[in-house]
Amino acid sequence: MYGFGYAQSINDYKLVKISCKGSVFVYSLKANSWREVGMFPYRILALDPGIQLNGAIHWVVSHSTDSQIIGAFDLVEEKFWDVSPPASVKNFYGIGVFGECLCILPDTDITSHNDFWIMKSYGIKESWTKVVITIPYFRMKPLGVFENHRALLEIDGKLVVYNFIDGTCTDLVIHGIPVGIEFEVETYIESLFSPYLRLALRADIRQS
């Protein structure tokens, strides 16, 4: 299991790897080296990549046979801590980022859902808020939030642009991907360089 993220306070990118024996290894781009930092303190529930937010990597985990929780690894302190889900949510199949907020997706193995939860204030359990949409789903993944209260969602194998004002949605068809073909979508940043650094480099090149 792995995760990749940026620690802003120390300006370093780090790759976190958890071995099959539970050892935790961290690669620092700034130091260009690997270090072993301890043991994974949770039971692994899925091999999905970790979700980066607020300088931490997050996974769906559990303590022994307890209910599921979110295990967070602080990229600066290089320590784990628990993020508790809402009291009413015992099981969830995935986590994500929705509008710069951590979100959890309820377990929908038996019946479809039309809701998910977002943590409006990071790390504060009482800030979990239910979001209801007009589309029932078995599997959903938030991909991005646009202006005018719209969001890009992957719902049951389809890309959907959803409007939170009037509850309408539009299927997003991608040329070259036939309808019904299974695919996977991820968001990404084009470069590790910040726009400000890139502009500064361009200015230096022009001056030279």
Image (cartoon, helix red, strand yellow):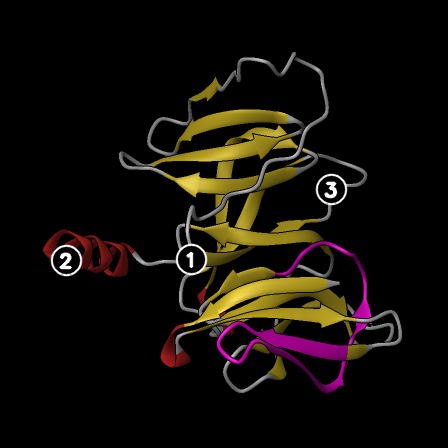
Q: Is residue 122 above or below residue 90?
A: below
Q: Quarter of the image holding residue 18?
A: bottom right
Distance of label 3 from label 2 (alpha carbons)? 59 Å
| Amino acid at the residue labelled 1 | Leu
Proximity of marks 3 and 2: CB atoms separated by less than 8 Å: no
Measured as percent of width and height from the top left, residue 21 is found at 89, 75
Q: Is residue 90 visible?
A: yes
x then y, percent, for residue 61: 74, 67
The percent position of residue 166, horizontal first and vertical second, equals 35, 26
> Position of 142 compared to 165: left or right?
right
Q: Which residues are magenta?
A: 24-50
Check the picture and name the quadrant holding the C terminus.
bottom left
Binning the other alpha carbons within 10 Å of mark 2 as few (below 14), some (14 to 19) or many (20 upward) gives few
Element type at mark 2:
loop
Q: Where does residue 24 sit, x and y in percent of width and height?
A: 74, 78
Tell me which residue sits at (23%, 58%) in the image. Answer: 201
Helix, strand or loop under label 1: loop
Which residue is located at x 65 percent, y 32 percent?
A: 137
* Foreground residue among 178 and 14: 14
The answer to whether 96 appears left or right of 119 in the picture is right
Marker disc for residue 108? 3
Disc nearest the viewer among 1 and 3: 1
Q: Which residue is mark 2?
A: 208
Q: Which mark is residue 54?
A: none
Identify whether 152 is placed above or below 192: above
Amino acid at circle 2: Ser
Q: Quadrant of residue 60?
A: bottom right
Residue drawn at (51%, 26%), measured in percent from left and top? 160
Q: Which residue is mark 1?
A: 192
The disc, 3 or 2, on the residue closer to the chain's N-terminal end is 3
Amino acid type of the residue that numbered disc 3 sits on in the rendered structure: Thr
Nearer-the-camera pick, 67 or 19: 19
